[in-house]
Amino acid sequence: PQGKALDMQESSPIHGFDTRVTGTNDYGPTENSDVCIITAGLPRSPGMSRDDLLAKNTEIVGGVAEQFAEGSPDSTIIVVANPLDVMTYVAYEASGFPSHRVMGMAGVLDTGRFRSFIAEALDVSVRDVQALLMGGHGDTMVPLPRYTTIGGIPVTQLLDDDTIDEIVERTKGAGGEIVDLMGTSAWYAPGAAAAEMTEAILKDNKRILPCAAYCDGAYDLHDLFIGVPVKLGAGGVEEIIEVDLDSEERAQLKTSAGHVHSNLEDLERLREEGKIG
């Protein structure tokens, strides 16, 4: 990490930033941080079962969250490790932080991918594309074309249903597309998404962004972290924004939440079996 930090530091005159970039192999220099981002976790390797991956990453993420909580007790935690929604819950439990100071980075990334594909299809600036995705990070994410606009114009007036459906499916598989092309997971877009969330917190911007937040009543969902639009500021998740969903969208969100709950049940089973310390 020291070498990567030095490489980034040496780019400061070119990019025009004065931030000091430091790499370290221990948690000491991170004490009293305002924001802690957990990217640690293993990818699934050949021959590794889903249970093995869940157990390993639970131990990793839980351990990191405990260290952050001890050294930076007033910080906000952003989780990037997968499976995202479950690992965010693990960090929440391990840190002992209030739920509004723990969140997962998924919605900003997934929405960014969706916006990028919309802009590509229409040959317009991505800056003019606004969108919202909800639900779990993965195949059960819930894109909302009704809330997608281009310069204020509903996307449904500019693209036919088949094209929108194709973009939705590509968005759901976007992470896998990167893996197929590079042989590894994405890092530029996830890094940019985490940075956007961090800036909103540090600058108290009150941004309305989708992220994996703790729901216990919102959208009639209970005791889970899942992608929803929130107001993000110095207090972390300061408010969950409840948008109107039609019956189909609400059903898709329920299905997505069911998938997250299933993963949480697997986590609890592994604990009962003694496979997670």
Image: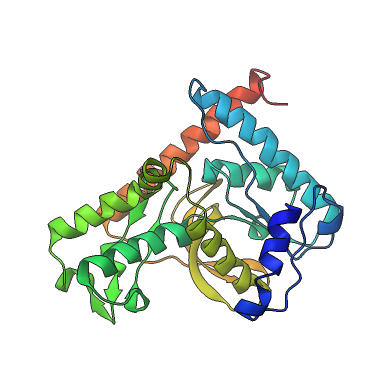
Q: Quadrant of residue 16?
A: bottom right
Most extreme residue toward the top is 273
Q: Position of residue 157 (x, y in %)?
A: 15, 73
Please give the name of the residue rendered at 48% of the width and 24% of the height, measured from the top-left corner: 46
Please give the name of the residue rendered at 35% of the width and 46% of the height, measured from the top-left corner: 177
- Taking depth in this image into account, of 15 and 119 the one nearest to the observer is 15
Q: Is residue 17 above or below residue 141?
A: below
Q: Is residue 117 above or below residue 57?
A: below
Q: Position of residue 45 (x, y in %)?
A: 51, 28
Q: Quadrant of residue 9?
A: bottom right
Q: Position of residue 137 (x, y in %)?
A: 44, 48
Please give the name of the residue rendered at 54% of the width and 24% of the height, measured from the top-left corner: 51
Q: Position of residue 14 (x, y in %)?
A: 62, 78
- Viewer can see residue 25: yes
- Taking depth in this image into account, of 103 and 262 the one nearest to the observer is 103
Q: For this view, does 94 lie left or right of residue 255?
A: right
